[in-house]
Image: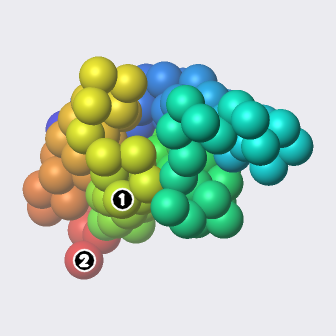
Amino acid sequence: MRNAATVLGLIAGIIGIFVGMFGFGWVSLTQQVPEAGQLGMFQNPGFIQFASFAAPLLCIAGGAMAKSRALWGGIGLLLGAALFYAAFGFNVATMFPIGFAGLGGILAIAAGKPDEEKAHF
């Protein structure tokens, strides 16, 4: 289960990088060119820029930690999924990062009997 959480977290983070780059870029564009904001603006642009950076980072770091520190990795993955959902909602662009990070987080936390002899709880 730890290996699955690692793979899911890394995939979620890589896909999330593209979502984050688009979100961060869109906020920057609407701040520089106000006319572009007519196509759609975010309610809280500072939070969107923070989540665009932090959510993929939490997914990748959580996936990387899932093998050795499954509890911390799972918490990181679940926080990454929550940030994606809070910032961008659930839509066609975010369904895979949210789903992969959420499932990876659940699998990492559920790995109560670890592959190694020391438990993470």
Residue 37 disc label: none
**22 above or below 42?**
above
Residue at image coords 79%, 49%: 31
Element marked by disc 1: helix
Residue 112 drawn at (x, y percent): 13, 61
Looking at numbered disc 2 in the image, what kind of residue is underneath it? Phe
* Coordinates of residue 16 in the picture (x, y in percent): 50, 32
Q: Nearer the viewer, residue 86 or 68?
A: 86
- The C terminus: image quadrant: bottom left
Quarter containing the N terminus: top left
Left or right of 67 on screen, residue 15? right
Alpha-carbon distance for marks 1 and 2? Answer: 28 Å
Looking at the rendered structure, which numbered label has been put on residue 121? Answer: 2
Residue 110, by quadrant, is bottom left
Residue 80 to residue 25: above or below = below
Q: Check residue 86 in the rendering and tell me which mark sits there, or answer none.
A: 1
Q: Quadrant of residue 12?
A: top left
User: In the image, residue 84 lies at what x, y percent?
Assistant: 40, 49
Residue situated furthest bottom in the rendering = 121
Amino acid identity at mark 1: Ala
Q: Is residue 101 visible?
A: yes
Tag 2 secondary structure: loop
Q: Residues within 10 Å of mark 2 (few under 14, many from 20)?
A: few
Instruction: Please give the name of the residue rendered at 74% of the width and 35% of the height, measured from the top-left corner.
Output: 35
Closer to us: 97 or 60: 97
Q: Nearer the viewer, residue 55 or 85?
A: 85
